[in-house]
Image: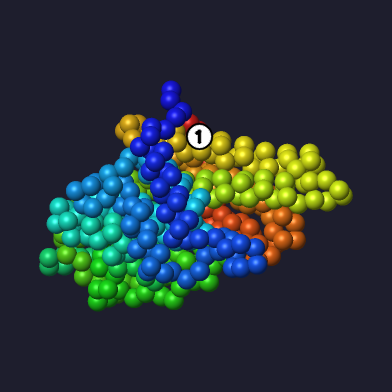
Amino acid sequence: MEFGWTPVQQRRYDEALAAARAAFPRQDRGGNAWHESGPFGKEGWQALGALGALGASVPTQYGGRGLGALDTARLFEAVGRGSADSGVVFAAAAHLFAAAMPIAEFGSPAVRERLLPRLCSGDLVAANAMTEPEAGSDVSQLATTATRTEGGYLLNGTKSFVSNGPVADVLVTYASTDPAAGHLGLTAFVVDAHSAGVLTGQPFAKLGMTSCPASQIEFRDCFVPDGAVLGAPGQGGAVFQHSMTWERTCLFALFLGVQDELVDRAVAHARRRRQFGKRLAEFQSVSDRIVDMKLRVEGARLLLYRACWAIDTGERAVLASALSKLAASQAAVASATDAVLLFGGRGYTREEGVEAALRDAVGGLIFSGTSDIQRQLAAVELGL
């Protein structure tokens, strides 16, 4: 068992970290928030494309970097640590894992050649449209339908909480082509978001990650040709699970990076700040809290790397991915809360910016499958 990184892997991490810090710089106290999402910006998106985050795991023949799951996660870990804006990194992860990867794996050669190079470069923004107002965790109850017509299908239905929805050029969506078959009757499609019959709602006002806008997407007799089907009709459930395995594993590497940065900041603050004539670091309650932060991130990191290994070796990754997502998302919330408490009143203010890490982390307990869903997936894998 090898716990080290090759020179190539370490150089990739260091270069991505430096590039993220340059593209999304943090401000000193007294300036803007240290860790705050703003509106979605095309310039930042192009920067992520330039450093390879938008196509990290896409084959090189289509403009990607051709990285495996572990190296892809490591890249997002570096970008998450170096970027002052977790929202845009999350947007990149949603774009790559829930949209570009299904296209790369299940799209026709023509669709791959037409879309993937522009998705990898940042010329296009992709979104995954699965969740519906009345179908969240239970994807077998999708109300969106795809009705057969000459040369393709007509999509009708409403999708909700579509990350990147308001700025998307490409949608990967799922609809029922055989309502009587439940989840076995789902079909995946890639849709031009600017097509007739695609209506994009206003961005939701969210707790955090505002630079990854989310909205409803409505389909009204939206025609998609046969070539827009990902995989085969009825294979939508498998397409979705493939994308979720990547997303639940690699996306949460960005939260490992954020936690690494929070630990560094907490240590620096505890060394610098003095109360009752002593540095905060000399109070055992303070040092214990920082050690707990470090313990959480390292435990989540090992689980996440284990899940990546399963993907890269072709091993069934459902259990490893569920445990990884559960650990990383819960650690992100707990450690961000600890960081706010360590900084005290300053941690509660937006000027310091630590509180934004907490606001950004809460969504991780919900998206990509809630914590309860991850426990159910793990229970099934354990034979319960």
Residue 202, by quadrant, is bottom left
- Quadrant in which the N terminus appears: top left
Q: Residue furthest top?
A: 1
Look at label 1 and name its amino acid: Leu
Looking at the image, is 256 positioned above or below residue 188?
above
Q: Position of residue 160 (x, y in %)?
A: 43, 66
The answer to whether any part of residue 323 appears in the image is no
Residue 30 rendering spot, x and y as whole percentages: 65, 67
Q: Is residue 120 above or below residue 59?
A: below
Reading the image, the residue beneath label 1 is: 302
Q: Nearer the viewer, residue 383 or 91?
A: 91
Task: Look at the picture and state if 309 lies above or below 75.
Answer: above
| Residue 153 image point, x, y percent | 20, 65
Instruction: Give the x, y percent position of residue 136.
Output: 45, 58
Secondary element under disc 1, as helix, strand or loop, is helix
Q: Is residue 352 left or right of residue 79?
A: right
Residue 69 in view: yes
Occupied quadrant, residue 320: top left
Camera-side residue of 377 and 89: 89
The tally of labels here is 1
Q: Residue at x 31, y 42 (%)?
A: 67
Q: Residue furthest right?
A: 276
Q: Residues within 10 Å of mark 1 (few under 14, many from 20)?
A: some
Whether 81 is drawn above or below 321: the answer is below
Query: Is 154 situated left or right of 295 in this image?
Result: left
> By what rule are the colours in the image chosen?
rainbow
Left or right for 328, reference 319: right
Q: Residue at x 49, y 53 (%)?
A: 82
Residue depicted at 60% across the width and 65% down the height = 33
Name the side, left or right, on which 342 lies relative to 364.
right
What residue is rendered at 52% in x and 45% in y? Answer: 256
